[in-house]
Amino acid sequence: MAFTASPEQPATLALYPKGESDLMCWDGMWFLLSTCEVPEAPLNAEPSDFLGIDLGIVNIATTSDGEITAGREINRIRVRERRRPSGPARPGPPAMR
């Protein structure tokens, strides 16, 4: 059976063999889902810098460095809503107009 993965994934699975795998059929295609237990990284007890994030309505997130972040799907909805006419809809089906 063919197996594809990014180059890092087989190396990680070989390095940390403890875990589990599941074989799953989805839309007629088979997938092998593998997980492995990776030890936690040591905590950074003395950070050198901090980053604040402001969650907003106009911009989803703005960092204290001034970087504005918004998701692609949110931006598509915003563009679609801007194009939509803002006035009230005409009443009745088209045959009655």
Image (cartoon, helix red, strand yellow):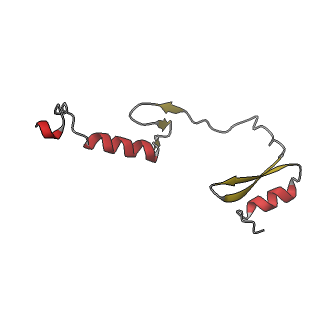
Quarter of the picture containing the N terminus is: bottom right
Residue 75 in percent (x, y) is at 39, 44
Q: Residue furthest bottom?
A: 2
Residue 12 in percent (x, y) is at 80, 57
Q: Residue at x 16, y 40 (%)?
A: 94
Q: Is residue 86 left or right of residue 61?
A: left
Q: Residue at x 57, y 36 (%)?
A: 51
Q: Residue at x 67, y 59 (%)?
A: 29
Q: Quadrant of residue 43?
A: top right
Q: Residue furthest front?
A: 95
Q: Is residue 17 above or below residue 55?
A: below
Q: Quadrant of residue 42?
A: top right
From the viewer's side, name the closer residue of 70 and 85. Answer: 85
Residue 57 in percent (x, y) is at 41, 31
Q: Is residue 66 left or right of residue 17?
A: left
Q: Residue furthest left?
A: 97
Q: Is residue 25 left or right of residue 19?
A: left
Residue 14 in percent (x, y) is at 86, 59
Q: Residue at x 70, y 63 (%)?
A: 6
Quarter of the picture containing the C terminus is: top left
Q: Residue furthest right?
A: 18
Numbered disc total: 0
